[in-house]
Amino acid sequence: MNSSIVISQSDGRPMYLQIMEQIKQKVAVGEWAPGEEIPSIRMMSVSLRVSVITVKRAYLELEREGVIITQHGKGSIVAKDPGLGPRLYDQEFEEHMEQVVRIGALLGLSEKQMTLRLRETASRLAEAQRNEAESLDEDFAKENL
């Protein structure tokens, strides 16, 4: 399995957190399936050029969170039901909302103005989705005539 995890030296977060975040993302999107073996601590540390201790810490935290299961002498696998999807999306949503509020404040927008812009954006996206669905329905109908 190719880990394809990238550690950024310019990222202010500790390396073990970067590793954890990327592994969670791979699990959440199904790139690493439940029950699938993940790279060993040693393999991961060599491929990322980081200390074994750094990867071990990431794996221990992931095990505490129920994302992976480690069996001594057998390695680590993705947990059968890590339940990451909703947790990750909620966390990411919260981070984006905080960023929206910070940027809105920098622009001098009031809470009311930010709320209005959020509603306008949601309406615009919903309309675009409806248009796309209608277009797909039309294409399907043309192909099946």
Image: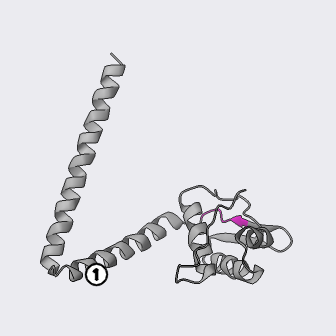
Give the residue type at disc 1. Answer: Arg
Q: Position of residue 31 (x, y in %)?
A: 60, 55
Element assignment for label 1 = helix
Q: Position of residue 12 (x, y in %)?
A: 52, 83
Q: Please say if 141 is above or below 55.
A: above
* Magenta-colored span: 77-81
Q: Position of residue 126 (x, y in %)?
A: 23, 52
Q: Quadrant of residue 3?
A: bottom right
In the rendered image, which residue does mark 1 sit on?
A: 102
Q: Nearer the viewer, residue 44 or 126?
A: 44
Q: Quadrant of the C terminus?
A: top left
To which quarter of the image does residue 109 belong? Answer: bottom left
Instruction: Locate residue 62, reporting x and y percent.
Output: 64, 76
Residue sticking out furthest to the right = 73
Rendered residue at 19%/56% (across/down)? 123
The vertical placement of 70 against 12, above or below, is above
